[in-house]
Each structure stands twice: as C-alpha cells, then as structure tokens.
Amino acid sequence: MQRYILIRFLQCLLALWVMSVIVFSLARMTGDPLDVLLPMEAGEGERERVAHHWGLDRPLYEQYFVFLGKALKGDFGNSWKWQGHTAMGLVIERLPATLQLAGVAIVISVMLALPFGVLTAVWKDTFFDSLGKIVALLGQSLPSFWLGIVLMWIFAVSLGWLPTSGRGTWHHMILPAICLGWFQVAAMMRLVRSSMLDVLDSEFVKLTRVKGLPEWKVVWKHCLRNAAIAPLTYFTVTAGVLITGSVVIESVFAWPGTGLLAVDAVRARDFQVVQAIVIVFSSVFLMANLLVDVLYAYIDPRIRY
C-alpha cells in the first residue's frame, strides 16, 4: 500500500509539472502584457524599461525556469494588475469564498443525489423513477450559466426574494450554489441508481432478505455500501471539479472567489495570478484523485494493489 501511494504521489507531481508547462505557455499566448501595463502612448524606451523590470525581455525558457524555481518555494511573483499584492496572496484571499460556495454545492449534491438515486433504483420503472430520469436529463443538459441567469431573473428580479450577486449573508449563496451543484446532482443520481441496480440483483441481497432482515436495512446498509465504489469515485472528483469549475458561476453572480479572480487576471494578462490559480486548482484536483485511489482499498477489501 505504501509503495502504491508513493508511486501515485510521484505521478501527481509529474502531472503538476506538465500543467505548469502548459499554463506557462498558454498564458503567454494571450498577448503582450505590456499592452495592459502601459498606456498606448508609451514610448519604446519605457516599454523596454518595464519589460526589463518584470523579466519579460528574457527568453521564454529562462522565464519558465525562473517561474518554476520560485513556484517550488510558493512564490508566484507580484500581481501586475493589483499592485502591492502577491499572486499567491490574492489566491489565498479569494480561496475561502470559493471553498464556501463549493462546500454548499457539495452538500446540496449529496443530500439530493444520494436518496433520490437509491429510491429510483428501488422503485424501478415507476412514476418516481421516470421523474428522476427527467431531473437527471435536465441537470446534465442545461448549461449552468443559462440556469443561473434564469434563476436570477425569477427569484431575484421578478420575485425579489434573493440578491442577484455579491457575497454577504447566506441568501447570497443559494442561487450560485444551486447552479454549481445542479449538474453534479444529476450525474451522481444516475451513477447511484445504476450501481444500486447492479447490487439489488446480486445473490447476497437475496440471502439477506431470506434471513428476514428489514428491507430498509437491506437497501441502506448492505446494498448502498456495496454500491458505493463508483459514486465515491465520482464524489471525490466532484469536490475538485466544483472548486476548479466555479469560474462560470462566480462570473455570473459576481461571487468574489478565485474563479472570478481568474477571469479578471486573464483579461488583464496578469500571468503571475493566472499561473498561481491554475497551479492551486490543479493541485486540488490531483489530490482529490489521489484520495480516491487510497480510499478504494478501505471500502472494498477485494481491491489489492
């Protein structure tokens, strides 16, 4: 087990290094940051001075090795747009808002997807099962930004029940959390349903019923535990997806998290902040995948490494 975890951890480090190369390259394809840092009437001498100050006059491979060396120490440089702030400092400052929104979205996803997925499997081919299929279809087909605009128009503009944007009270979290977790509810519900259907037809379930166990214990204890491998895999990855995939929702609802910070940084061609955000998001996603692999052996004893 220890050897497997070590190998997977090294693979995560390799993936993180590849991601650093990709984000470093793509960030510089967005254009020259001097066009944003300096006014249009700036002379050539001033452009050369600013480029030398930020190291933009060096070859790209030198810029990358400087970036990599500092990144290993947790230093992603100073922000170009937000003067006086470090890139990692901005990410850390905005990260709690993203974690808060993702946490609420995860709670909504699990509380809705788990019981509905189990019940649609138990009551297969009933009206409730058909209703669950419709919810799953809509959840996986409706774009999150469109759903956010529609919910904002209904509950914020027309009814005036909830605020349209910003972060303050718990009322501000309702609409963005629903939009962020809506797709995950549909996907997880379908996954729980299919896993439960496989387990409900197994021989050991028939044996537990023959022994006279209550149906609720058969379904919620024995069946759900054996059907938890695939949903757990998706749930752990979902935690990373919700954190890293909050860019669109945070932009729609002006939620002051790292997603909105990423959009503003890309528009300003602030390479330092973009690189810091992508590396942090990549680390979260990779650690979520690593956690899934480690949890496999503890849930299903049949799995060996």
Image (cartoon, rainbow, N blue to C red):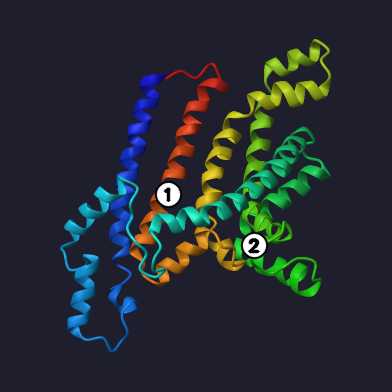
Q: Residue at coordinates 52% horizontally, 53% vertically from top-left?
A: 95
Q: Amino acid at mark 1?
A: Val
Residue extending furthest bottom? 41
Residue extending furthest front? 84
Residue 189 placement (x, y as % from top left) = 67, 42
Residue 289 placement (x, y as % from top left) = 47, 37
- The C terminus lies in quadrant: top left
Q: Residues within 10 Å of mark 2 (few under 14, many from 20)?
A: some
Q: Which residue is mark 2?
A: 167
Question: What secondary structure is found at the residue carrying circle 1?
Answer: helix
- The N terminus lies in quadrant: top left
Viewer-nearest residue: 24 or 42: 42
Say whether residue 79 is visible: yes
Question: Is 110 displayed left or right of 36 in the figure?
Answer: right
Q: In front: mark 1 or mark 2?
A: 2
Q: Residue at coordinates 71% horizontally, 57% vertically from top-left?
A: 174
Residue extending furthest top? 211
The numbered dot on residue 228 is none
Q: Residue at coordinates 30% horizontally, 72% vertically from top-left?
A: 33
Rounded to the nearest angstrom, the CA distance separating label 1 from label 2 is 22 Å
Residue 297 placement (x, y as % from top left) = 51, 21
Viewer-nearest residue: 84 or 80: 84
Question: Looking at the rendering, which quadrant does residue 191 occupy?
Answer: top right
